Image (tube, rainbow, N blue to C red):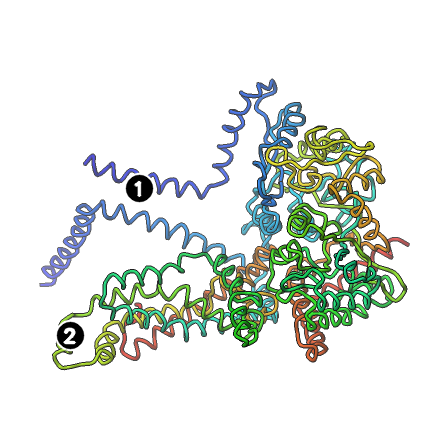
Amino acid sequence: MNKKLLVLLPVLTLLASGLAGCGGDNNNKENQPNESSAASTETKSPSGPPTTLTVEVFDRGIQGQPDLNNNTWTRYINEHFGKPNNAVVKFVPVPRSQEIDKLNVMMAAGEAPDISFTYDSATVSRYAKINGIMPLEELLEKYGQDLKNYLGETVLTYGQFNGKQMAIPAKRTSLAWIGSFIRKDWLDKLGLPVPTNRDELYNTLVAFRDKNPGGVDGVIPWGLAATGMNYGTGNLAESFWGEQSEEDFVTSPNWLKPGNKESLKFLNKLYNEKLISPDFALDKTAKQADADVTNGKVGFFSANWDYAFRQNISEPLKANVPDANFIPIDTFKNDEGKYKKMIYNENGLNVFIPKSSKNAELAIKYLNWMANPDVLFFLQYGEEGVNHKTVDGIPQVIAQTGDNMQMSPQNLDYTLVVNGVELGDQEKNIKALSASYAGLEETAEQSYKINTTDGYTSFFYDTPNDANIKYGKTLGDLNKQMTDKLIVCKPSDFDSLYDKLVDEYMAAGGKAVMEENVKIYEAMQANKK
Amino acid sequence: MKAVLGRDSQRVEIRRKNRIVQNIKRDFLLYALLLLPMAYIALFRYAPIYGVLMAFQDYNIFQGISGSEWVGLDVFRFIFEQDSFYRALTNTLVLNLLDLVAGFPAPIILAILLNELRFTRFKKLTQTVLYLPHFLSWVIIGGMVYLMFSSGGMANTILSGLGLGKIEFLSDKTNWLIMYVAVGIWQSAGWGTILYLAAMIGINKDLYEAADIDGCSRIRKIWHITLPGIKPTIIILLILQIGRMVSIGFDRPFVMGNSLVSDYSDVISTYVYRIGIGSGDFSQATAVGLFQSVVGLLFLVSANYVAKKIGENGIW
């Protein structure tokens, strides 16, 4: 009998624990005090057990990155914010590439971190609309005065939905978005000038293809990856767009803009003349494009304004092809002689506090603490001699690995109130920003200048667009598919395919989004008057 | 008379009850073991069914099912108006049909070939090699396919080396379909042979001996003994496969697809992923899932009905 019971016991316990799993919520509540009481004996805080403040952090999967919850930065935060406030700041890693998916799941489960964030403001407006995040007006007033002063009125407006402050946007100090780069050493070898418009670029690309100045196996004049990744077509489309009223321009999808068809036709021509990466549409992670660029096969590409100077590109390229030299160029000129391009608004990521959070007050205090210049400086630049050296009053980052490593430029995943360098002075910021690209400071500064000239920002709608919430993701996917298909298709099929795809796009929600845009736009204009 | 009969049936009743109690008493450990799988099924297969309610609600992730607004069939109405839904549905059916036509016979043929092997060691080795791809994740297979069949990949390098010109294996729609099916067969055919091989072991050896004496050729033996021997297994697997016609795995089309072939690679599972997880519209995702299950059930029931009509054993 005893033996039999022994066998039965594990079965029953398994069953019991399985059933207990159903009431997951209760379990968590029971566990929490245990955890924090253990911690409290360590800190010996006088005012009872410390509160755990959870904060989202991107996991970018960088090689050699330290524990995202235990490194120089998190320890500094816990030491300087945690201790005085009797709190433990715990970071919740979220994979960078599945940011929204993961957030959706955590929000639905009521387990989103106290401080959550996303770069996608459509997601914030969706959460605001279904009443899942906290209005922050009063909390900011009470606990966030420094933060309010730091961000300023304009930046904060980007976090308002239907007139209520639902999110706290980070301040963006560097506004350049995209850039285009060309191999100067190839141009020199062929005796060609830097291209300054589309036709010159086209001729240069043809020369790259025919003369193969790098002497590489399989030269790729224009390096590209599947749409939606880092690699793109820069401000090519803008250079084709014709004139439109402001209302038409901001409310209509790019597909309907006059001249947009020609811009894709141009790309289609380039692709069919073998001037663009042959398999770009299959390169869903941009790994192939990265490899082609760093192996010195690519002559020209468009990506983020600093992409050619980033460590993961510039260092392997230098090792593989020591002479390789990418310089920033402005080559997509429109009929007015301008190099129109999109730049960032003054806001960066959006921080919000889920309704399920019990530590809203502490969360605001945390962000308020972070707005302190000293704190920001340490989080962005660390200790002198370890993480940076000062040259002419400008801090220069020293790349580190392990504990002191910064997983993102200027540690932006840990400094949620700012995107970009913050030294309290815009000119200094840009200098310091360029200084972070060791050995390429001047080129980087030039790139920043080029890519903030003739810039325009995307229009900010102060009311959530219901149609966009519903169709946004589908349309986003369609955008990518349409672009890739139109670049690859046979030139003879191009016109009919373009019209067909745009019709499909409009039917799949494009029209609804546009109509809603017009409605909101007109209401905003009426309010202004 | 009546009273006696009544007493008899009562006695039978009591005896039956006793027998059940007795059985449980005798084998209670076995029954206890059964509890676990039953709990698993109840917990993970039946309990989540209540989530189907979301399909009839304007589901708000923060209010939950109890707090969300009921909207009747609005969600379904919305879905059936979407072109992208029909595209996903058609693609799912097409891909599954191709898998059925090309992929279903593959393990049968393979199993027969294996069964004919005389040299046991070689047979075992071949089996193991054939099973292996089954254990690879689709993400890895997708990477391998890309390396081998992209325009700069191995296959095209060989082709152009032979002066045959390149073939767009992955970006041409028709070629992609062929690749999709072929890679699927490569991945799962070996694993699929297990059930058939097991069924073949059950065939009476005397039949083969008798056929040998009668001077039968190998092909004749396969045709008249092996195939009829595994027919019930084939039918049951066929019915099950038909029942799965509207459902499709997520990884294979997602990993293998790309924007150029999205006209074929966008299927129900990727559609559900996009609207459910991607846009956070759980109502729509649930509604599509429910639709998928209902249609799947219809397929299953009709396949079973047909099988029974033609004189085979169904699955129930």
Q: Residues within 10 Å of mark 2 (few under 14, many from 20)?
A: some
Amino acid type, label 1: Val
Label 2 and label 1: CA atoms lie apart by 46 Å
> Residue B42: percent from the left, percent from the top?
38, 52
Amino acid type, label 2: Leu
Depicted B33 relative to depicted B96: above or below: above
Number of marks drawn? 2
Quarter of the image for residue B297 reads bottom left
Quarter of the image for residue A136 reads top right
> Residue A282: percent from the left, percent from the top?
59, 64
**Horizontal arrangement in the rendering, residue A340 relative to residue B74 (left or right):** right
Residue A313 or residue B82, whichever sits in front:
A313
> Residue B262: percent from the left, percent from the top?
59, 68
Is residue B90 something that shows in the picture? no
- Give the residue pinned by disc 1: A11
Quadrant for the N terminus of chain A in the image: top left
Q: Please state the chain letter of the residue tagged with numbered disc 1 in the rendered image.
A: A
Quadrant for the C terminus of chain A in the image: bottom right
State the SS at label 2.
helix
State the SS at label 1.
helix
What residue is rendered at 47% in x and 54% in y? B50
- Give the residue pinned by disc 2: B207
Q: Please state the chain letter of the residue tagged with numbered disc 2 in the rendered image.
A: B
Q: Are circles 2 and 1 on residues that touch, CB within 8 Å?
A: no
Residue B17 or residue A429, whichever sits in front:
A429
**Horizontal arrangement in the rendering, residue A407 relative to residue A424 (left or right):** left
Residue B200 or residue B61, whichever sits in front:
B200
